[in-house]
Image (cartoon, rainbow, N blue to C red):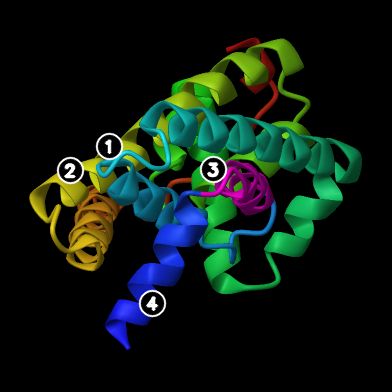
């Protein structure tokens, strides 16, 4: 069974369609977080260690898709304006993520988009927020580019390391690569949780009047 899965995966990874799939999944993930784009990029990185697909192709396709997806989410937020953020408040978890995005945008400006790339659900919350508060498109594109490139390089290299570690068994490499990616995400979440606990409970939600000037 595992041999059949491995053979099928190798065929898919050796096809040029994999680059289109990487681009599409990464783009969709920008405004539909349920799409497992990171898993696909890590897997492609694992097989890149065997020569197919090409590592640089995986990075370019993933980064380009992420860049496009971020802009779609930004435009959705810009079109809906504050109404979209009001809808996010309907759920406790979504409300918390929206508040985090707003605070982080005020404190760190566009750099928060790079950090949010590694926080589950954070990427979409930040891009929607930046659109809703009319964050300058030129600045947004700059930081979205940084975030997309760093994410593409990170995911592909994590997979590549797993592939090199288990060149004789790519499936084990996939498990290792995904495990490393999850570990990094967990560390980022733990750090964010500790920082949030240190905030005063009575802290009010910051205004975003000057967020676009950062």
For the residues labelled 1 and 4, the Cα–Cα distance comes to 23 Å
- Counting from the top left corner in percent of width and height, residue 106 is at 53, 27
**Quadrant of the rendered structure where residue 160 is?**
top left
Q: Is residue 199 visible?
A: no
Kindly identify which residue carries mark 2.
161
Earlier-in-chain disc, 3 versus 1: 3
**Quadrant of the rendered structure where residue 72 is?**
top right
Q: Nearer the viewer, mark 3 or mark 1?
A: 1
Element on which disc 4 rests: helix
Q: Residue at x 29, y 53 (%)?
A: 185
Kindly identify which residue carries mark 1.
157
For the residues labelled 3 and 2, the Cα–Cα distance comes to 32 Å
Along the viewing direction, whichever of 35 and 10 lies nearer the viewer: 10
Along the viewing direction, whichever of 40 and 83 lies nearer the viewer: 40
Q: Nearer the viewer, mark 4 or mark 2?
A: 4
Kindly identify which residue carries mark 3.
101
**Disc 3 and disc 1 in contact, CB within 8 angstroms:** no
Q: Is residue 22 magenta?
A: yes
| Residue range of the region highlighted in magenta in the rendering | 15-30
């Amino acid at each position: 069974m595992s041999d059949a899965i491995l053979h099928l995966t190798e065929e898919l990874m050796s096809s040029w369609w994999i680059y289109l799939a990487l681009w599409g999944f990464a783009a969709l993930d920008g405004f539909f977080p349920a799409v497992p784009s990171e898993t696909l990029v890590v897997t492609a990185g694992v097989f890149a260690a065997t020569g197919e697909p090409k590592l640089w192709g995986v990075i370019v396709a993933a980064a380009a898709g992420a860049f496009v997806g971020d802009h779609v989410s930004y435009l959705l937020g810009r079109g809906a304006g504050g109404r979209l953020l009001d809808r996010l408040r309907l759920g406790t978890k979504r409300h918390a993520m929206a508040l985090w995005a707003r605070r982080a945008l005020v404190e760190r400006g566009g750099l928060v988009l790079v950090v949010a790339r590694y926080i589950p659900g954070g990427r979409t919350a930040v891009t929607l927020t930046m659109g809703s508060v009319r964050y300058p498109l030129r600045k947004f594109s700059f930081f979205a580019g940084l975030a997309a490139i760093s994410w593409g390089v990170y995911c592909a290299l994590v997979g590549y390391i797993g592939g090199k570690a288990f060149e004789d068994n790519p499936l084990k490499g996939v498990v290792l690569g995904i495990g490393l990616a999850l570990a990094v995400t967990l560390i980022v979440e733990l750090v964010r949780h500790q920082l949030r606990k240190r905030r005063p409970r009575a802290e009010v939600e910051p205004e975003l009047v000057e967020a676009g000037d950062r």
